[in-house]
Amino acid sequence: MPDFSHLDLLDPKTFDGDTRPLMDWLCEKGVYYDPNSDMWVAASYDALVAVAKDPETFHSEEGNVPKLPNDPSFINLDGKKHRTRRGLIKHLFTRPAVAKLEDHIRDAVDKLIDDVIEQGECEFVDALAAKLPIQIITEMTGIPPEYREEVHRAMDVFMLGGNGPDHVTEEVNEAFINFGFIHMMLADERRENPQDDLLSIWVQAMDKGEMTEDDVLFEHTMMMIGGSETTRNVVSGAVQVLAERPELREALLADPSLIENAAEEAIRWVTPFIRMSRTATKDTVLMGHEIKKGEEIMMVYPAANFDPTKFEEPYTFDIHRDLKSTKVLSFGFGTHFCIGAFLARLEVKVALEQLLKRIPDWELVGAPERVSSSFVRGIKSMPIRFTPGERLGAVAAK
């Protein structure tokens, strides 16, 4: 196996190209100290779970993004503070609450397909994969449609800062400021006219003294990032692999009951977020390695999701894979398990159902352009073509 100890895991170029040899090396190391990033790394399935399930020893309150300071969103809180803040909105993200959105999500997917179906081709990421989750999460937070595109552009730029301190540029800061202006304007509106949305809940909490203005702003920002990136990258990755392996697409068309499991396999296969971090609250031992109080631990999710001791033939996209006995770690583990996991799963499932139903013969037009990042795994651009069809409205009119 090649030695990758010279690589800096905070460098976006480290994750360009074929990362399978790197992931295998990381997973075999399990836990190790990386002098290049001056951090411990937890990369095997068991190592990552051990860190994630023990917030008393490995806490989040010094930040979740390696080498960057924390912010006041609940992802950077632990214990009672985390439970209280998360509890304000968790009722909107339970499985039953999310299930009520299925028809609306399906309608949103169909409208996006309608926009391109007569053309027989599109740039898939921009036309559908990115637009679907940004629509749903902006609706849930309370951002009106007229601001959706501006917020989308701001988040795309702001995400670049997740690569590390060297990437927090003036452009990144400006994107955050632009989003902040929209956020503050809408927060003021919600104070005067509360709605059934997340922003109204946060503003009410602020007025009760339970949250500060900064708390609300960063909570909103976190929700926009998590709510848009996961589905965008998973749907794109699924469309790519199903184009490359048409026999799987035929199997899903023959038995649509397999789509839900295929969506979960796509969540493992893509693993949209590469890493998060924790900080040791005390001297401790992690899988035989002595970690000192205050040292940072980077959790590398793709390596854990391709751990061959947990997932047989991990580099095979298997729509029949048993993903119930061994949970996929793309949404994290333990108390910080992603609050939007049920929503993302539903969005991916519904998107695949409607794509298979309405443009089942899609194929790639050239190689997809991948995002260069040490924070997220995704596709920047992916042109596809398919047999042109009719808009749903045109079909209904006949």
Image (spheres, grey):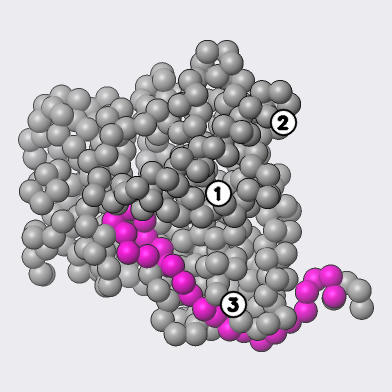
Three-letter amino acid code of the residue under disc 3? Cys
| In magenta segment, residue 76 | no
Please identify, in this view, whether the residue under mark 3 or under mark 1 is nearer the observer: 1
Q: Identify the residue at image location x=45%, y=81%.
A: 244
Coordinates of residue 169 in the picture (x, y in percent): 32, 49
Query: Label 1 belongs to which residue?
Result: 151
**Image quarter hosting the C terminus:** bottom right
Query: Label 3 belongs to which residue?
Result: 122
Three-letter amino acid code of the residue under disc 1? Val
Whether residue 107 sits left or right of residue 373 in the image: it is right
Coordinates of residue 377 in the picture (x, y in percent): 37, 60
Query: Label 2 belongs to which residue?
Result: 195
Q: Which of marks 2 and 1 is nearer the N terminus?
A: 1
Whether residue 385 sits left or right of residue 330 in the image: it is right
| Circle 2 Cα neighbour tier, 10 Å, few/some/many (<14 / 14–19 / ≥20) | some
Coordinates of residue 263 in the picture (x, y in percent): 52, 61
- 275 up-or-down from 222: above or below: below
| In magenta segment, residue 380 | yes
User: Which region of the structure is painted magenta?
Assistant: 371-394
Q: Earlier in the sequence, mark 3 or mark 1?
A: 3
